[in-house]
Amino acid sequence: MINSLGLEQAAEPIARRRPLRWALLVLGWLLLLAGIAGVGLHYSPWVWEPAVLAASFASYLMAGALAAVVLLGLARQWVSTAVAVLVSAAALWSQAPMLWPDGSAPPGTDLVVMQSNLELGRGSAEAVVRMAREDGVEVLTLEELTPDLLDKLDAAGLAELFPYRFAAPSGNSGQGTGIFSRYPLTDGVKFDGFWLNNLRATMLHPGRGSVSVFAFHPIPPLLNTGVWSSELDRLRAHLDETTGPAVVGGDFNSTYDHAAFRALISGRYADSAELLGVGALPTWPNDRSWGPVIGIDRILIAEGHATALRSVTIPNTDHRAVIARLRL
């Protein structure tokens, strides 16, 4: 009787723990599958709208693999835990370039660049000019620039702060784009064949000479993923055509987890966030209580490094602006 009673009492806690372990196992595998999907989306070249849109959030899905290691370990499912560890390692490897700084910047010429999407011309002109003045911005790139907003920007002091410009404002569906500089701009080009205005100009910097400046705005993949992919490929081709130092400000409508964006920075161009190892630096959407969640506003550099980077809120627009201190 005593032995039988003792076995029954010992069996009760085991029976109670079994449903908990099953729950940990099921939840752990669900999170692990999310992590596997995130890694797959990061490396996927698919130009299929659901996959492209999901890839925007691939890094969040990858976090599931890290949580799965804990849950599957608690469930004492060692084979499953080992799989979760391998997937977590792949996830960390995929994100390592954005999380690990690329050394320190060598001596050179500093240049402060600001990038801002102004949401169909609704962004605060006063805030843009104030931020640019306070941070000593020397080059400003703007997207979704309308003629009316350009007038407001000039009234707020933009023309005095940036006496040189190459701008193509438009009141049509966010097409407008502009490059503004404290130093002379020459050889302005608006690239043909894009839905939105994509620009290039040559800045004559007093300490560095000729510097190519680009302002990019490929279409969002929500409109047409085939055209989105094609535009990113063609923008890369335009970058590859230039030599010498260059800076690029843009709303790329893509994240580091999109293979098409990583192709842009696979050559001599580098993302300032990647150089500094600051991670995704989310910029959109900034007009939601739960945002921003993805980083699509970027500043790139060729033949240089970055020494500082931050994002700032511009009222009345759904994008955070980005300000980078670069060293050419």
Image: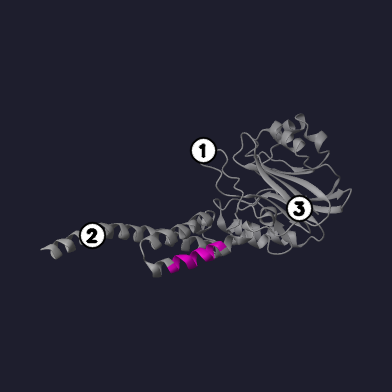
As drawn, 37 above or below 206:
below
Q: Position of residue 270 (x, y in %)?
A: 71, 58
Task: Indicate the quadrant where residue 103 lies.
Answer: bottom right
Find out whether the residues at labels 2 and 3 contact each other: C-beta distance under 8 Å.
no
- As helix, strand or loop, the secondary structure at mark 2 comes to helix
For marks 2 and 3, give the one nearer the viewer. 2
- What range is drawn magenta here? 82-92
Q: Is residue 238 visible?
A: no
Q: Position of residue 327 (x, y in %)?
A: 79, 52
Mark 2 or mark 3, earlier in chain? 2
CA gap between label 3 and label 1 equals 32 Å
Find out whether the residues at labels 1 and 2 contact each other: C-beta distance under 8 Å.
no
Looking at the rendering, in which quadrant would you find the C terminus? Answer: bottom right
Q: Looking at the image, which residue is at 51% across and 38% down?
A: 289
CA gap between label 1 and label 2 equals 44 Å
Label of residue 289 in the image: 1
Identify the residue under disc 3.
Answer: 247
CA gap between label 2 and label 3 equals 64 Å
- As helix, strand or loop, the secondary structure at mark 1 comes to loop
User: What amino acid does circle 2 point to?
Assistant: Ala
User: What amino acid does circle 1 point to?
Assistant: Ser
Q: Looking at the image, which residue is at 67% across and 60% down?
A: 264
Q: Is residue 93 visible?
A: yes
> On the picture, is 291 further left or further right than 75?
right
